[in-house]
Image (spheres, rainbow, N blue to C red):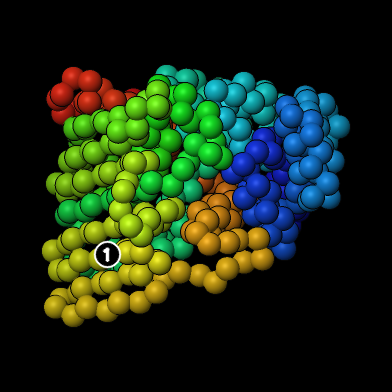
Amino acid sequence: MPQGQDARIAVVGCGFYAQNHLHAWSGLRDQGAELAAVCDLDSERAKAAGDRFGVPWYADIAQLLDEHAIDLLDIATQMRSHQALAAIAARRGIASIVQKPLAPTLETARAIVELAQEKGAWLAVHENFRFGTGIRRVKQELDAGSIGTANWARISFRTGYDVYAGQPYLAREDRLVVLDSGIHVLDLARYFLGEVEHLSCELQKRKPEVAGEDTATMLLRHKSGAVSLVESTYQSKRSPDVFPETMLEIEGTDGAITLARHQTMSVTSRGKTETLSVGSPLLSWTSHPWHVSQEAVLHANAHFLDAFRSGREADTSGVDNLKTFALVEAAYEAAETHASVKPKFA
């Protein structure tokens, strides 16, 4: 797009989590984001979002795109609608950001990416955990060599928070925790330790009322030789509950890093340990405990905006996200076969 021109953005999906997308785009106005319109199949929900953010609202995406020159479509809907919406954007030559998971299956995710490539349409996936304030701070320490070469990690998203209250459809999903939150922590494993050679996985359904697995314990061998233990559950009984924070332990040749509750990071480097807070103050639209996740949305959107306006791929482009999705599929296969599985990246 022309240098210096604001990106006109439309958000599709105005539900529970999409409110964070709407606030984030509004907060990026001075960085070149113009929230131009919103859309939701539920016209009352669309109208409420449009009125709240002072933009036109629609219940029909085709009508929105016919009436507005949109540069970037933020698709914040449930996963089964992603392929159709991303196809509409790609065929109109409109860039899009698709909420994770990109699709219900790796096959469908590949089809979304391939169509975008065929049409020359910019595509990113809203995989936001790696954009969290504390997570970015840990990555800075790793990149600075504070602990030498990272060779072991435990990445843990464990909560008993009632995720079904705000997103009741989750209780009906046959593939639940790996595809919903496990995909986040698998992406972090790639982010910190690189690509994966093979993985094994054990799944559990500890809450009888849900259709799918609510607990996943995964063991990854990375191509670097590093090993990571990756966990995700919605049935944690620990107190206090750390939702929605991710707990980290990363060890290296010269030290270790931990990220603990309240975004407290400890870095042990060559025998000396420093502990500091790496969180951020609340914004006008963020609140405890959601601020950790809300800030990740803001930083992710800022990254997408900058990448799109600069004409480069996002860090979590469609192509890159297929590598994370391949780990999801490998985890389900490993749990079913009780064997270590090589992810199918191609």
Q: Is residue 117 left or right of residue 51?
A: left
In this view, the residue in front, 300 or 155, is: 155
In terms of depth relative to the viewer, which is nearer, 331 or 97? 331
Q: Residue 246 appears in which quarter of the rendering?
A: bottom left
Circle 1: element type: strand
Name the amino acid, label 1: Thr
- Asked if 139 appears above or below 216 in the picture, the reply is below
Look at the image and tell me whether residue 117 can be seen: no
Classify the position of the C terminus by image quarter.
top left
Give the side of residue 3 with respect to residue 242, left or right: right
Q: How many marks?
A: 1
Report the front residue among 74 and 170: 170
Residue at the (26%, 31%) spot, across then down: 204
Q: Residue at x 36, y 59 (%)?
A: 240
Point out residue 103 in the picture as x, y percentages from the top left corner. Answer: 49, 26
Q: Position of residue 290 (x, y in %)?
A: 52, 56
Q: Few, some or many C-alpha atoms within 10 Å of disc 1 (few <14, some 14-19, many ≥20)?
A: many
Q: Position of residue 183 (x, y in %)?
A: 38, 38
Report the residue marked by disc 1: 258
Say whether residue 197 is left or right of residue 55. left
Residue 18 in sight from this viewpoint: yes
| Residue plotted at (82% across, 26% down) | 63
Would you say 47 lies left or right of 247 here? right
- Say which residue appears at 25% left-offset and 66% top-offset: 257
Q: Is residue 222 above or below residue 91?
A: below
- Which quadrant of the view contains residue 250? bottom left
Residue 84 in picture, x, y percent from top left: 62, 21
